[in-house]
């Protein structure tokens, strides 16, 4: 913490501030300038509240200097983390694409989607079994049956599974069916859930809250890391701004920022980030060009009849075309995207 | 839903849109103007997704017309709801003030706070037993022991109790000790929790999420109301904006807006809304002047040593003075604030 | 400026930072802690760019400490500024209300409005002669003829005049007719205009830009003050946030914040701040309760036929009622609002 | 305009609304559903204020349906506009890069920058002669001398010139020296300036205001187009959001949105959009991947000693590398970026 005193602060005011800092566990270094005193305070408790010092008489400004997250910071672990899910490595040289329907609706739907996304080069199948909906009157998901269908379709096509866990009580269920447990934007600060996931030994995909700063997001990842689970994948999915032509503003700049601050891999969700099918491909390309380690994209073989989020789901042909574009872009940043044309044909039949 | 077709939309495009609307359960009224066709669609399913129509060819714009909340809307219940907690009536003529420490820390602390706020005219004692904290390294609350102390101090001074429930698993515990269960801003869209509270027969104080629109907030209240629990009190506590001199921007205009859209009572939290002690009184006065049904304010007898949020807690003398100012303001909007000088002395001993 | 070095920063990195700070004109105080070095830099040039230091190797964070505004800060002038316009004193004990139509439309309209607002206790007549409009196809104002009518109606009823200046070229014209020159939100950073107004000897009403931080707003006032014109009145008129039920979010908390940071008087504009007639009175009351020195409100005798902003204009009877409410509230913060019942009758004939 | 009546609206309320719409010049189509009446209103005046109808009794909601901009809309001109500046075509198959220093500081500086950016493939030289600065105490630019140096350096290297015009009074001067006149973000709604530029026959680069919606931005372009100047280039340069790790949030999604709504070319400014050198390349790549027609980037041969914005300027070697990356990305969206290796060597000596 750095405390800047007022220009006319008295000696006794300064001493009172020093006493408070010491009481909070800090070592204090005093620097007396021509017009002001500056106090550098190091080593205090993690939860020391700068506002307590800010309220003291004679204090001009208080600045916190230690990032409150530790395990998530790149200075803690300079090399980037690679989250491995079997042979799928998120954070490595390959840009990993996760794709599939918003919600699992039926066996036919999820199998068709799995086949389509596998053919195009996706490595992970996404799909929701429990849907958090703003309105209590909307479709709420198939539950465990949905997870079973998702797992089956993924296994049939050699894909991994990512699906959302909405509550602590659902953790064992998701753990049984999914390879990656997704924490939705609304749960980014559900600390009870995050703590529980910290005890798991399975990757967690942590979406950024709609109005979370990057610091708050990294702090949330810290809850998982602090529990001993180091496999956290961050996912930018759009922030709320005054502009509402698109549902959210996908914060592409968060990608290079997170890359600098943290060692954790980061992917982007252009489907929720825009809410409109025709904006998904441009934003997916932008995310990869900006350095994202992967993407999570909604693909539906019949989006017009999807029970949720149909308007933001790509048709398989659109997804194929996007993957081809991404294969051109990836080398610009020293990355690649899976092709496997032969295996592909094999899987698809 | 109203669908506005493009100026040059073809007849077959229009017919395809009508077919989609009918498939979604709507009755469609067609209005053909000189340059455009407008389709009025009424009576469809609650969860009909306007975006599905928006993606069709020839569609210029789609506008949703039914508010997605029903039970919370003033048109559903024109008279304002009064939430009664014993003889304390929130939403009636009296402006109800809830006050107390951020967290319960010790018996002495909570008893002193209860005495101080009761003396000044508060009717409800606030205090957290479980603290949701952004950082896993911060003080997390006393748990059930905190609730017990809070209940005891409140009973001693004739106050009601409001305290936060952070998770479904805590509902029975909070139900045992508190008169009003508070849902924090981060949980505003924890639908599992809201549904559970809908089954309770106890008032729920629902804080607005930091980036929630008023519509989303009312929709969240709908989860509780739909369960059969009609006693929801809304609480404005600041939204996130680009301005960060104060921690949040207390959205005072939300007060008259909610009053028009909904029958539910609304109070304001100037402590979390500003995060700074010296801004609490001006914003508390503003909230009452704008028509709030009450306030929830942090008061601590020794804020400099509070374990959480000390910087935004009022000293008892500041709280006394604020209550005196509020007594002047309340009549401007046809309200009053409790005085009871004799009873007061009695309680305070 | 305070520079916090990385935990593992090398001595040569630290020395390079010190050299850069010295080159920028700073005195540097070095404080070496157990884990980090902190550099306190004081006395540099006003326009020193912290980002230049931020980019150097080994730098963890750079914090600017001197507020970039000087003349506007309360530390420069501890007592509050009172802007006097004849016998009308803005920033004194009385809450000053400025009212009138959005645009001057006709002699009859402006005279009726002047009579109505004077009767209710307003001291200044507002009205636009040049209207900045987002669309080039909208009504653009009466120009000089509008100013003439405004002046005449104001003189007839013993009122002062405030009107907007949109461009440097209009300054002499406005100077001829108005007592206070208003700078609109869109012009808050029109530095050419601000500099010109700094040379004037007439009060300037400086509206906050729709997305301006409080610091940027005070910096803009500094352009006027630096020219030698000390009579700046700040006006909060709403900021742009994600919530768009109201046109803007009137930032009531800016009132106590500005009162602490600056000596300049601050008023609020609840008409533009909300854009809706039924929200004007609650927000006007809130602003006064929060400590505003005045209000600027749109009043129109026939708002349904106003050529601009009719929907946010109060009817005279609504304005009367609001003024009565404000008279109850003002004493809560040690202020008053003009009554003059006899003179009032006199003026009203 | 579409007017949705309340569920219980009376016949006389509906008729009053219809009368108001007719008075505003609309043809009204009435659609009576089971629970509500919907009124479709077409053909009214451009400046008809929906809020006037919104205030009437019985009105549930009013929705504007005609976009207020016309000349800028893609429906007005389905094919994309290509702005030609000599042989440089903005909006065509080639991605055009404009680059150079933030401010012109000296002959040596601008010539070195021109040589460097030309060598790497830029087609237009950027550089400010008049700098709008938030603080009155900062460097304000070289004025006409700066323009002269910029023109000279550009001509020497076969580049076009883009430079900012801050005020109506500067239009003739800029017209003399620059090929493209840039309107800064703060002037996006300086309608006097926009109108003047509409009379010019020279391309205008219109930056998006820091808090402008896409609709407001297109409306501002309409002021230029309505004057008869069809050569408007839009420039996304970051919006203000709650996240302030980067100076602004570059709204990459605005690129595909504008491409759909308007025929005008759009470029991006990753330098001002991020404010940090190390974020410029990722965001430049993202903008091109999302479909931008060009970029405007700050390059300085000695950024550490730049008089303004040094921290966001690229070194020439960084710019070279970025251009190489962009050449890989452009084909993914069917575009190219200039190479000209021979001519390049020629120019570079």
Image (cartoon, coloured by chain):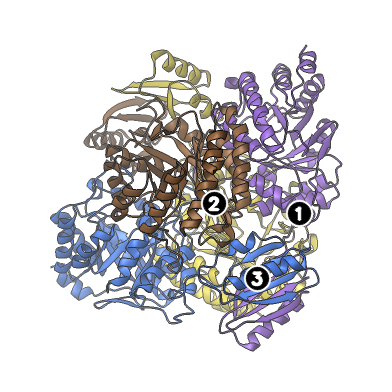
Chain colours: A yellow, B purple, C brown, D blue
Q: Secondary structure at mark 3?
A: helix
Q: Is residue B64 left or right of residue D335?
A: right
Q: Which residue is mark 2?
A: C248
Left or right, A34 with respect to B201, comes to left
Residue A164 in the image: x percent, y percent? 69, 56
| Residue A206 x, y percent position in the rendering | 61, 51
Quadrant containing the N terminus of chain B is: bottom right
Q: Which residue does the numbered mark 3 point to in the structure image?
A: D19
Q: At numbered mark 2, what does the secondary structure look like: helix, strand or loop? A: loop
Identify the residue under disc 1.
B73
Choose top left, top right, bottom left or bottom right for residue D177. Answer: bottom left
Q: CA distance from mark 1 to mark 2?
A: 23 Å
Q: Chain of mark 2?
A: C
C-alpha gap between disc 2 and disc 3: 30 Å
Q: Is residue D140 above or below residue A29?
A: below
C222 or B147, which lies in front?
Answer: C222
Q: Is residue B137 visible?
A: no
Question: Is residue C213 depicted above or below A349 in this figure?
Answer: above
Q: Which chain is home to disc 3?
A: D
Are the numbered discs 2 and 3 placed on the same chain, yes or no?
no
Q: Camera-side residue: D131 or C174?
A: C174
Tell whether B192 sits left or right of A182: right
Give the distance between the C-alpha atoms of the residues marked 3 and 1, in whole angstroms. 29 Å
Identity of the residue drawn at 82% across and 30% down? B177
- Mark 3 and mark 1 on one chain: no
Q: Position of C303 compared to D114: left or right?
A: right
Residues at discs 1 and 2 in contact (Cβ within 8 Å): no
Name above or below for residue B7 compared with residue B237. Answer: below
Residue in front for this viewpoint, A261 or C200? C200
Which residue in the rendered view is the most extreme toward the top?
Answer: B349
């Amino acid at each position: 913490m750095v405390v800047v005193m007022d220009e006319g602060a008295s000696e006794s005011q300064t001493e009172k501030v020093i006493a408070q800092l010491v009481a909070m566990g800090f070592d204090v270094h005093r620097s007396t300038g021509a017009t002001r005193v500056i106090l550098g305070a190091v080593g205090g408790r993690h939860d020391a509240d700068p506002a307590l010092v800010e309220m003291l008489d004679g204090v001009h400004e208080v600045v916190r200097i230690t990032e409150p997250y530790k395990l998530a910071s790149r200075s803690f672990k300079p090399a980037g983390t690679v989250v491995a899910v079997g042979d799928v490595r998120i954070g490595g040289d390959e840009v990993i694409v996760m794709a599939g329907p918003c919600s699992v609706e039926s066996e036919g739907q999820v199998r068709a989607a799995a086949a389509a996304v596998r053919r195009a080069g996706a490595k992970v199948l996404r799909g929701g079994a429990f849907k958090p909906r703003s309105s209590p009157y909307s479709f709420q998901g198939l539950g465990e049956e949905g997870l079973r269908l998702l797992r089956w379709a993924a296994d049939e096509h050699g894909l991994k599974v990512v699906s959302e866990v909405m509550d602590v009580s659902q953790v064992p269920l998701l753990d049984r069916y999914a390879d990656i447990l997704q924490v939705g934007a609304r749960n980014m600060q559900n600390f009870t859930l995050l703590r529980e996931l910290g005890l798991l030994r399975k990757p967690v995909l942590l979406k950024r809250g709609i109005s979370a700063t990057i610091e708050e997001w990294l702090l949330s990842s810290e809850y998982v890391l602090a529990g001993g689970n180091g496999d956290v994948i961050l996912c930018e999915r759009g922030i709320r701004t005054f502009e509402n032509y698109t549902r959210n503003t996908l914060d592409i700049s968060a990608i290079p920022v997170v890359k600098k601050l943290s060692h954790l891999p980061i992917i982007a969700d252009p489907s929720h980030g825009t809410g409109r099918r025709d904006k998904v491909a441009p934003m997916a390309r932008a995310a990869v060009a900006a350095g994202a380690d992967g993407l999570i994209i909604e693909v539906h073989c019949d989006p017009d009849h999807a029970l949720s989020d149909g308007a933001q789901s790509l048709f398989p042909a659109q997804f194929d075309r996007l993957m081809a574009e991404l294969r051109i872009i990836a080398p610009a940043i020293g990355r690649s995207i899976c092709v496997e044309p032969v295996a592909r044909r094999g899987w698809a039949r």
